[in-house]
Image: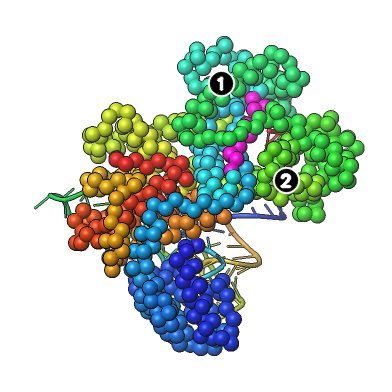
RNA sequence: GGUCUCGUAGCUCAGCUGGAUAGAGCAACAGCCUUCUAAGCUGUAGGUCUUUGGUUCGAAUCCAAACGGGAUCACCA
């Protein structure tokens, strides 16, 4: 919450307590909203909650409250207007001017929370390249890591790479059968795409083989299990688990190709990690915890020796934790990794950025760890996000309906170039500068597009409509920033350590409405970050940056900075736009988006 | 079928810890560049907030039910 609102609430509380000593009040009883645009004032105290309590008419309370506030805090409250149960407060212009001056270019106060947080995101499979849906995961994880850091937490960014399993074996089989030793080097195909191509190839052949078996009279369900290529893949997985040298070598080879490809994509995206976990190292973890759980009697064995947990008292089912042959299942590995993370880093919180299709799985994981008495259980938090869908439905890599991440990045950068050229804005840039600019605009648009909606909600992406560079976009915000930088260049005012006249600013008495709007938004920034962190919601930051850029544009259109009426006004406006530029830059950088100084 | 989740303008989304006449962007229409970047600004039009009940001084927001989407309920990961 904005500090100004907190201050206002405290003032209201003080006045209420003094005016109605026979009652007791608390801060959370006081509702303060932003005043609707059609009324005068900036913030509004809602009076209805007090009507019943005080047995007075709203207007009586309002008049009492308003006049006392104005009298007691003349430097803060300029005026009040009472409109049918709403007390609209006008904040003193001087108060806002002082706020801007005193907060100007102040680094955010270094808070330390002593909280250590791990955030796991990306976590790709190594059998195919990243697609559009993965981008949402990556951007969300990276943005949340940055946002959590602003709250003083120590953040560890982790990537758990799913580098083993039947899906990799499928790519391997298809490669062995059909690739004729093709490599990224020999084909010029990016490693992750090459491996992904053979994953698709596998599925094509698999479908053919199933169809053939069906044609020869086999039932579909059986055919799906008996297709030769699938049997080969399963046999390969077994060889992998038995540590067969050739299998491991090919596996490593193909994974390395994929990592090369991922590395390139991550670098373009500006996504990074502090720690990698590999499932080939972690998939055997968790068995010890299961053994412990058996001893404690939390888990039980069935006749076939498989190990289970009964969650029926929690409204869930029985869940398998170890197969009858003693091998681990997916959740066994998760149990082990959760403990490993916790032990390695003494985590207070462990966040998993995973799509909402795994809500049930994550719920079960946390519950099991909790029942096993593992201390890591409490800190587990599933940052569940909705899937990105096409207008035709879900993306399926097996069916080739995915929007490839690398393609999308290329397209966005090309779009940025096209629109920049069409707008005739390329002059004065070197080739390198233009390349950087197109990347900033293209990637910015992509990131913003995926981060601007509430993570919890699934979103629909229509490739045909592509991504716009107008309106509610990163480009809009970048443009506002570039405009400010342009003014500063013309006025010969430094961006970072400007020489401004503090006394002149403080001598200014009144603000225009558009100026006030910008200051009020600037004042909300810190509170907004706290909200974004608490709600795990980067879209709040995106939304805020857009609003701030919009308020700046409105101000810019209505008032001249270079030709302000007075020196005081000009100085104030320089303070205002510089602080706006820095705030936009900071906010956007939390989303992983750069803001150019010219575009 | 059980559990979870979503349903707001033609489209994509805000608003949801209850508060005033429900907001943006895109698309449509009408204006604004001899003055700091028009990737911008201003305005018009567009809504039974899926429906029905309930709680309340007050409901898009909370509760219940219905209808309609989606996810999940694997010895896959």
Question: In the image, is residue A492 above or below residue A506?
Answer: above
Residue A157 magenta:
yes
- Nearest to the observer: residue A204 or residue A196: A196
Q: Badge 1 is on which residue?
A: A257
> Which of the two discs, 1 and 2, labels the residue nearer the N terminus?
1
For residue A178, the mark is none
In the image, which is nearer the foreground, mark 1 or mark 2? Answer: 2
Which residue is most to the front? A503
Quadrant assignment for the C terminus of chain A: top left
Q: Quadrant of residue A567?
A: bottom left
Drawn side of residue A554 relative to residue A528, left or right = left
Drawn side of residue A378 relative to residue A422, left or right = right
Q: Position of residue A453 (x, y in %)?
A: 48, 50
Q: For residue A397, say whether it is visible.
A: yes
Q: Residue at 77% of width from left, 46% of height from top?
A: A374
Q: Position of residue A548 (x, y in %)?
A: 37, 55
Which residue is most to the right? A303
Q: For residue A205, say whether it is visible.
A: no
- Cα separation, mark 1 vs mark 2, equals 35 Å
Q: Position of residue B64 (x, y in %)?
A: 66, 67
Mark 1 chain: A
Range of the magenta residues? A155-168
SS for dot 2: helix
Drawn side of residue A566 relative to residue A54, left or right = left
Is there one chain holding both mark 1 and mark 2? Answer: yes
Mark 2 chain: A
- Nearest to the observer: residue A43 or residue A67: A67
For residue A376, the mark is 2
SS for dot 1: helix
Q: Position of residue A571 (x, y in %)?
A: 27, 57
- Nearest to the observer: residue A169 or residue A31: A31
Q: Quadrant of residue A443?
A: top left
């Amino acid at each position: 919450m904005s500090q100004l609102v907190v201050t206002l609430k405290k003032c209201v509380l003080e006045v209420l307590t003094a005016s109605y000593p026979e009652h007791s009040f608390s801060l959370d009883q006081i509702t303060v909203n932003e005043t609707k645009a059609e009324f005068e004032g900036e913030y509004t105290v809602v009076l209805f909650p007090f009507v019943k309590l005080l047995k007075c008419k709203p207007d009586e309370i309002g008049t009492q409250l308003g006049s006392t506030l104005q009298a007691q805090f003349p430097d803060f409250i300029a005026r009040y207007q009472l409109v049918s149960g709403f007390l609209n407060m006008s904040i003193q212009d001087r108060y806002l001017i002082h706020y801007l001056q005193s907060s100007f270019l102040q680094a955010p106060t270094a808070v330390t929370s002593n909280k250590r947080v791990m955030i796991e995101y990306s976590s790709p499979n190594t059998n195919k390249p990243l697609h559009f849906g993965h981008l949402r995961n990556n951007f969300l994880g990276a943005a949340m890591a940055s946002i959590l850091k602003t709250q003083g937490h120590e953040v560890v960014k982790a990537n758990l790479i799913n580098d083993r399993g039947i899906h990799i074996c499928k790519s391997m089989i298809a490669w062995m059968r059909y690739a004729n030793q093709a490599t990224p080097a020999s084909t010029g195909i990016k490693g992750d795409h090459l491996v992904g191509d053979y994953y698709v190839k596998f599925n094509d052949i698999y479908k053919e083989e199933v169809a053939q078996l069906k044609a020869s009279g086999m039932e579909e369900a059986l055919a799906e299990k008996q297709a030769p290529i699938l049997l080969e893949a399963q046999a390969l997985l077994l060889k992998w688990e038995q540590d067969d040298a050739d299998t491991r070598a090919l596996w490593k080879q193909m994974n390395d190709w994929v990592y090369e490809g991922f590395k390139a994509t991550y670098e373009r995206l500006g996504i990074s990690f502090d720690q990698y976990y590999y499932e080939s190292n972690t998939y055997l973890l968790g068995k010890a915890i299961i053994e412990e759980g058996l001893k404690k009697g939390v888990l039980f064995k069935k006749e076939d020796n498989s190990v289970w947990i009964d969650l029926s008292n929690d409204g869930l089912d029985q869940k398998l934790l170890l197969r009858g042959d003693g091998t681990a299942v997916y959740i066994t590995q998760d149990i082990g990794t959760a403990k490993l993370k916790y032990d390695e880093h003494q985590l207070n919180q462990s966040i998993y950025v995973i799509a909402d299709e795994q809500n049930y799985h994550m719920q079960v994981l946390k519950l099991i760890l909790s029942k096993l008495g593992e201390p890591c259980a409490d800190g587990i938090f599933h940052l569940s996000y909705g899937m990105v869908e096409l207008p035709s439905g879900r993306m399926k890599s097996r069916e080739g309906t995915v929007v490839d991440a690398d393609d999308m990045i290329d397209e966005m950068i090309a779009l940025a170039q096209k629109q920049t050229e069409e707008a005739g804005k390329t002059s004065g840039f070197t080739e390198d500068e233009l390349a950087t600019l197109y990347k900033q605009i293209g990637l910015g648009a992509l990131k913003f597009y995926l981060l601007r909606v509430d993570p919890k909600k699934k979103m629909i992406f229509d490739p045909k409509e592509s991504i716009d560079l107008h309106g509610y976009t990163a480009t809009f915000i970048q443009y506002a920033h570039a405009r400010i930088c342009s003014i500063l260049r013309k006025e010969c005012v430094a961006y970072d350590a400007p020489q401004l006249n503090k006394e002149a600013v403080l001598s200014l008495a009144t603000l225009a409405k558009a100026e006030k709007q910008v200051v009020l938004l600037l004042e909300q920034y810190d509170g907004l970050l706290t909200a974004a962190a608490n709600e795990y919601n980067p879209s709040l930051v995106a939304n805020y940056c857009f609003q701030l850029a919009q308020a700046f544009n409105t101000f810019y259109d209505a008032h001249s900075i270079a030709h302000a009426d007075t020196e005081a006004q000009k100085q104030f406006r320089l303070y205002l736009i510089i602080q706006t530029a820095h705030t936009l830059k900071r906010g956007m950088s939390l989303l992983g988006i750069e803001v150019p100084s010219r575009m």
